[in-house]
């Protein structure tokens, strides 16, 4: 495992990728296959009672991680440019748990189980980063019965209920009460709402989070919810907020929330369990941290996707 992780990190340091303006019309050579044939060949057939990644022209999904109940719970895809990776997660096979960091979000409660990786690692299927620091004043935060920072109406909100269901909502519209919830993590306005991007040509470098040194391009992450309740985590390497919104609109996300950004903060991983332990894979080689970062309690918050019993 250590040799594989070191090799992936070396590959990430050598990788140079550029941002693109849209999801389906990327500034890269087109595949020799027709878009319809690519989608039909790569996307599992959807049958009643079964979830499947969205069929999108030119997007190739590949299964990842361990099977749950005979099915893969996660599928990965990368845009033609290679700058954006997408991780689709099956709500029938997974439950979600939020783990607050040891330092961020600031001043929030921490449960005994949050400090014990043994409470999530044995069934870990995937994991991804949380949101901005509370001191950035981009939204409220509620966890384990405590409102750490006041929740604000109409802001994008990642909510997880007591049964492990995760949703991406506009606070006060789809959800307006913390009853039955374990966490509400807000982060600016919705990046996607009603299947449409909420980015604008007038957006500045700080509209969707201030990038390092005011840079136009940054490493970014986001989470979208589809109409069937499945989720797509998105990681972008040196991209704009508009690129991120376009990526999630492209996979038919109904709503989406922007998550953490800048060089080291975002990261999405899938995991496989073997007789020798657990092995993780970055969803894009450019992710800076090793997959092992979420095999322990970390300084910043993250979400783990766990295989249903």
Image (cartoon, rainbow, N blue to C red):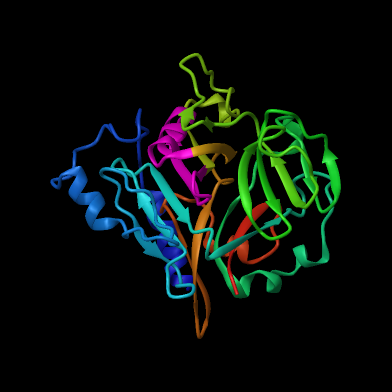
Quadrant of image for the C terminus: bottom right
- Asked whether residue 220 appears in the rendered view, the answer is yes
- Which percent across, then down, holds residue 6? 45, 64
Query: Image point 45% across, 68% down: which residue?
Result: 65
Question: Does the magenta-highlighted stretch encompass residue 251?
Answer: yes
> What is the x, y in percent for residue 114?
76, 63
Quadrant of the rendered image containing residue 297: bottom right
Q: How many marks?
A: 0
Which residue is painted at 37% across and 49% down in the image?
A: 54
Left or right relative to 269: residue 155: right
Residue 87, compared with residue 17, is above or below; it is below
308, above or below 207, in the image: below
Q: Residue furthest top?
A: 202
What percent of the width, then of the height, locates residue 159? 68, 46
Q: Magenta residues?
A: 225-253
**Which residue is at a point 51% across and 31% down the rendered structure image?**
194
Give yes or no for residue 35 being in the magenta stretch: no
């Amino acid at each position: 495992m250590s040799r594989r992780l070191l090799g992936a990190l070396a590959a990430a340091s050598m990788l140079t990728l550029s941002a693109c303006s849209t999801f389906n019309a990327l500034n890269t050579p087109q595949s020799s296959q027709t878009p319809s044939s690519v989608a039909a060949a790569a996307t599992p057939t959807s049958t009643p009672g079964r979830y499947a990644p969205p069929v999108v022209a030119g997007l190739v999904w590949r299964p990842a991680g361990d099977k749950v109940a005979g099915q893969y719970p996660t599928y990965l895809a990368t845009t033609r440019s290679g700058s954006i990776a997408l991780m689709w997660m099956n709500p029938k096979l997974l439950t979600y748990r939020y783990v607050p960091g040891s330092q961020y979000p600031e001043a929030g409660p921490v449960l005994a189980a949050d400090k014990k990786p043994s409470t999530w690692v044995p069934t870990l299927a995937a994991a991804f980063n949380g949101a901005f620091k509370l001191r950035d004043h981009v939204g409220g935060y509620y966890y384990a019965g405590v409102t750490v920072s006041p929740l604000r109406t109409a802001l994008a909100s990642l909510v997880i209920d007591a049964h492990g269901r995760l949703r991406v909502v506009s606070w006060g519209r789809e959800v307006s009460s913390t009853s039955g919830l374990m966490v509400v993590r807000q982060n600016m306005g919705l990046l996607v709402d009603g299947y449409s991007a909420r980015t604008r040509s007038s957006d500045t470098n700080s509209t969707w989070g201030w990038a390092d040194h005011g840079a136009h391009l940054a490493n970014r992450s986001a989470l979208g919810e589809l109409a069937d309740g499945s989720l797509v985590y998105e990681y972008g390497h040196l991209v704009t907020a508009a690129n991120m919104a376009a990526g999630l609109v492209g996979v038919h996300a109904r709503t989406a929330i922007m998550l953490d950004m800048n060089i080291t903060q975002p990261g999405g991983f899938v995991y496989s369990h073997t007789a020798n332990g657990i092995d993780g894979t970055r969803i894009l080689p450019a992710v800076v941290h090793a997959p092992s970062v979420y095999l322990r309690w970390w300084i910043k918050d993250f979400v783990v996707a766990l295989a249903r019993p």
